[in-house]
Image: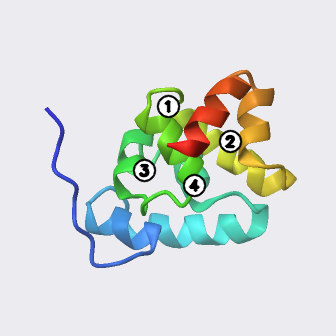
Amino acid sequence: MTKPKRQFSSSLIGQRLIEAGYLTQEQLDKALAQQSETGLLFGEVCLLHGWITFEQLKECLPPLRSKIGQKLMEQGVITIEQLYLALVEQRSTGHRLGHILIARGWVDESKMTVGSHN
């Protein structure tokens, strides 16, 4: 049974994690400092410290901005974890998301064509 989508008062991931009871203000402050020092994503810092699980992060993330990624997930072609990793790689390399998904072997080119037209 799928949990109903939680409604948050903030669009900021850190505030959403606090609101959900998954993160403390002290952890938020530490994560923000480490994020600026390392260039890692906020969620990555929290995951690396073990303060939150991937499921908790996923629950609190704002809606995905990747339309092709969202379509491929809805079709069951890729997982949220694969999409997240590909988006992180895209952020650091500047490569197109489809190229990354194909290069990692998670999607074949025929699925990319289908995914982009649905």
- Please name the colour scheme applied to the rendered image: rainbow
Q: Which SS class for mark 4?
A: loop
| Residue labelled with disc 2 | 86
Q: Nearer the viewer, mark 1 or mark 3?
A: 1
Report crowding for label 1: few under 14, some 14 to 19, many 20 or more residues within 10 A (C-alpha).
Answer: some
Q: Earlier in the sequence, mark 2 or mark 1?
A: 1
* Disc 2 from disc 1: Cα separation: 11 Å
Three-letter code for the amino acid on which mark 2 is drawn: Ala
On the question of residue 107 being in view, the answer is no
Direction from residue 102 to residue 78 in the image, left or right: left
Q: Residue at x 77, y 61 (%)?
A: 38
Q: Residue at x 27, y 68 (%)?
A: 19
Q: Residue at x 56, y 38 (%)?
A: 115
| Residue labelled with disc 4 | 66
Tell which of 90 and 43 is nearer to you. Answer: 90
Q: Nearer the viewer, mark 4 or mark 1?
A: 4
Q: Nearer the viewer, mark 4 or mark 2?
A: 4
- Are circles 4 and 1 on residues that touch, CB within 8 Å? no
Q: Nearer the viewer, mark 2 or mark 3?
A: 2
| Residue labelled with disc 3 | 57
Q: Which SS class for mark 1?
A: loop
Residue 118 image point, x, y percent: 49, 43
- Are circles 4 and 3 on residues that touch, CB within 8 Å? no
Three-letter code for the amino acid on which mark 3 is drawn: Leu
Direction from residue 110 to residue 60 in the image, left or right: left
| Residue labelled with disc 1 | 79
| The quadrant where residue 12 appears | bottom left
- Are circles 2 and 1 on residues that touch, CB within 8 Å? no
Three-letter code for the amino acid on which mark 1 is drawn: Thr
Residue 70 image point, x, y percent: 49, 46
Direction from residue 118 to residue 20 in the image, left or right: left
